[in-house]
Image (spheres, helix red, strand yellow):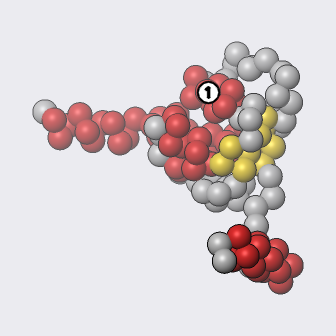
């Protein structure tokens, strides 16, 4: 019986996304997300999990932070955030990935700054 319960617990969150496991937006664990208009009331037509994400996004948060706080898998969080972004309810902040020369320069400056702090 216990194994059955734990299996159900792993599958259930994907019902929030209609079984979808991929977001339409590039959302990394460190990507920051915020409500497009923090002063707007939470739309009542959203599923409860999306409402909770929207409310938490009144303050800028990372995808990983939202996933951990809501105790739902990262993939589910990414899909729900993607849906909210499609509805223009949340803003997905640009994420530095280190894949372009200008991003590498920013990361190198940050690293040098941290090194100076700890010398």
Q: Quadrant of residue 12?
A: top left
User: Is any atom of residue 19 visible in this view?
Assistant: no
The x, y position of residue 5, in whole percent, is 23, 34
Q: Which secondary structure lies at badge 1?
A: helix
Q: Name the residue at the front extreme.
A: 119
Q: Nearer the viewer, residue 111 or 76?
A: 111
Label 1: few (<14), some or many (≥20) within 10 Å?
A: some
Question: Residue pushed farthest left?
Answer: 1
Identify the residue at image location x=52%, y=49%: 74
- In percent of width and height, residue 29 lies at 60, 56
Q: Nearer the viewer, residue 17 or 49?
A: 49
Image quarter of residue 61: top right
Looking at the rendered image, the quarter that the N terminus falls into is: top left
Q: Is residue 25 above or below residue 69?
A: below
Along the viewing direction, whichever of 13 and 41 lies nearer the viewer: 41
Q: Is residue 60 above or below residue 27?
A: above
Residue placed under numbered mark 1 in the picture: 52
Q: Residue at x 71, y 70 (%)?
A: 117
Front in this rendered view, residue 87 or 107 = 107
- The image quadrant where one finds the C terminus is bottom right
Q: Quadrant of residue 57?
A: top right
What is the number of callouts on the image? 1
Task: Give percent across and percent down for residue 107.
Answer: 76, 75
Q: Residue at x 75, y 31 (%)?
A: 58
Q: What residue lies at 59% left-to-right and 41% top-to-bottom?
A: 66
Query: In this orientation, does residue 67 appear?
Result: yes
In the visual, does 52 lie left or right of 24?
left
Where is residue 64? Give x, y as percent. Answer: 57, 50
Q: Left of 91 or right of it: where is 24?
A: left
Relative to 119, is 102 on the left or the right? right
């Amino acid at each position: 019986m216990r194994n059955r319960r734990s299996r159900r617990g792993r599958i259930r969150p994907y019902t929030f996304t209609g079984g979808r496991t991929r977001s339409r937006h590039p959302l990394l664990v460190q990507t920051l997300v915020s409500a497009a208009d923090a002063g707007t009331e939470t739309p009542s037509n959203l599923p409860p999990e999306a409402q909770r994400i929207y409310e938490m996004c009144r303050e800028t948060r990372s995808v990983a932070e939202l996933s951990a706080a809501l105790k739902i898998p990262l993939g589910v969080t990414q899909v729900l955030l993607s849906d909210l972004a499609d509805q223009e309810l949340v803003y997905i902040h640009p994420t530095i990935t280190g894949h372009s020369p200008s991003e590498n320069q920013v990361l190198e400056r940050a690293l040098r700054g941290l090194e100076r702090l700890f010398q």
